[in-house]
Image (cartoon, helix red, strand yellow):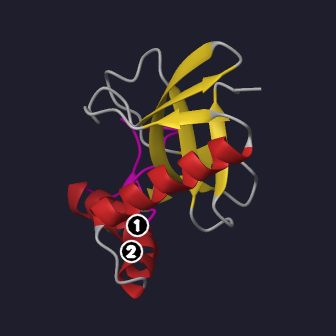
Amino acid sequence: MQQIKCKRCEKIIDTQRRRGRVVFCGRACRTAWFFERSAPYVKKRKERNELRHVTATRSVLIVALNLLERGWEVYLPFDRVASDLVGFKDSRAVKFEVRTGRKNPDGAWNWPTRIGDEGKTYAVVALDHGNEVLYEPSIE
Ligand SMILES: [Zn+2]
């Protein structure tokens, strides 16, 4: 049996049933850790005086502009559940699912995915990185 510190409160815990994984002393610390991790982003959004749905709309507009600048025709669907934007270029149609994500210091991107995203192209906006957009899979 091995002893390890809780990732959040540093309380000593034994790891006999969860060796090798990220560990917390309990559910409360786990929940608090994820809440605290998102706090800076919530704070930044509040500083921009921005509601969550405004963030989403802002990302859609950033992607639309990014696609237009790349020479795409861009359309807004009536049904935003189906996809956020539709683009046409070189006789090709693409359904875009726009997500607000993060670009980590190591260059890796993170964004939320959902069931039902299959077959769509993600257009991920990293607000903290000069409105940079990542297309996954690539649209080039
Ligand atoms: Zn803890």
User: SS class of the residue under badge 1?
Assistant: helix
Disc 1 residue type (three-letter): Ser
Q: Give the residue displayed 70% in from the left and 27% down from the top.
A: 138
Q: Which secondary structure is most common in the magenta stretch?
A: loop
Alpha-carbon span between mark 2 and mark 1: 4 Å
User: Which residue lies at the image location 47% right of the left edge and 15% below the top edge?
Assistant: 119
Could you say which is closer to the camera, residue 35 or residue 91? Answer: 91
Q: Amino acid at mark 2?
A: Ala
What element does badge 2 sit on? helix
Please provide percent x and percent y for residue 31.
27, 59
User: As drawn, is 44 to the left or to the right of 62?
Assistant: left
* Quarter of the rendering occupied by the C terminus: top right
In this picture, which residue range is highlighted in magenta?
A: 7-26
Crowd band around label 1 with a 10 angstrom C-alpha radius: few (<14), some (14–19), many (20+):
few
Judging by the rendered image, the residue that carries numbered circle 2 is 39
Residue bearing mark 1:
38
